[in-house]
Image (cartoon, rainbow, N blue to C red):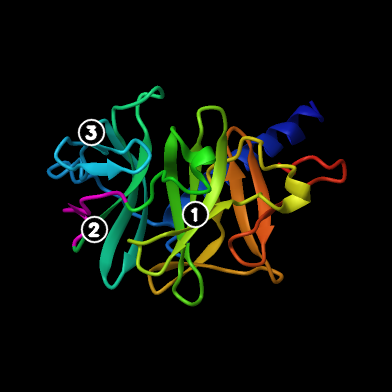
Amino acid sequence: MKLIFPLLCLVIVACNSNNDNKETAVAGKDWALLPFSKTDSINPVLLPGSVLTFKCPVRNDTVRWEEKDVFNPAALVRNDTLFLLYRAEDSVGKYAGTSRIGLAWSADGLHFTKHPVPVLYPDNDSLKKYEWEGGCEDPRVVEDENGQYFLTYTSYDGDKARLLVASSTDLYHWNKHGPVFSKAFDRKYLDQWSKSGSIVCNYQNGKAVAVKINGLYWMYWGDTDIFLASSPDLINWTPIETTEKKLLT
């Protein structure tokens, strides 16, 4: 009985502590974006469609570039306007559609207007071998301290997903920089599966601005596991390894 009573007290304290943490998390206005409520009268805010067409430079043919799907957007505010960079798929090709990144904007966060053509897509460039014909997927975006945008996205060549980065000053025109791990550790991770790069940032005046910690930018990335990488410039990234030269999870 002497052992059971302390253990019972410990369980009660732990349960109360968990409840307290949950209540604190729900009430935590300093970090939580609360409350959320669905506006079913206008949902979904984006739909696929066959109206918008695009002359694909790789196929050399016109495609309905968002006919199959629209999903996985990154959101940001620019000039008091909410922008979405979203993944769109056509219905052509051996992978049930090629993905491209589209752009939409809204003055109220509810009603969106689409740019008629994708802003980031596979092209006849040096990155075609990584992006074709699966495409460009799953955008995530931050700004740097000078207002330049950096977009991490996933390329898919039909065999591997790779994490790539592009930059822009206006959200419409993007400069591709290639795989984020193209230089680190003598290209050790270039041909390994990588995706979903989320760069650590601060929110400043409603904007997600990449922040340096100990002189470097940091990024969480991965798929079934979450890894860490650092960068001096938001373009060239180095995965963090353990002492056994394996990815730190």
Magenta stretch contains residue 111: yes
Locate residue 183, reporting x and y percent: 70, 53
- Quadrant of the image occupied by residue 98: top left
Task: Write down the region rendered in magenta.
Answer: 108-118
Q: Earlier in the sequence, mark 1 or mark 2?
A: 1
- Spatial CA distance of label 2 from label 3 is 19 Å
Kindly tell me whether residue 229 is visible in this rendering.
Answer: yes
The kind of secondary structure element at disc 2 is strand
Q: Is residue 5 left or right of residue 105?
A: right
The amino acid type, in three-letter code, at marker 1 is Thr
The kind of secondary structure element at disc 1 is helix
The kind of secondary structure element at disc 3 is loop
Crowd tier of the residue under label 3, counting other residues whose Cα lies within 10 Å: few below 14, some 14–19, many 20 or above: many
The residue indicated by pointer 1 is 24
For this orientation, the residue located farthest to the front is 60
The amino acid type, in three-letter code, at marker 3 is Glu
Please name the residue shown 59% across and 38% down the image. Answer: 15
Specify the label residue 67 is tagged with. Answer: 3
Locate residue 162, reporting x and y percent: 57, 40
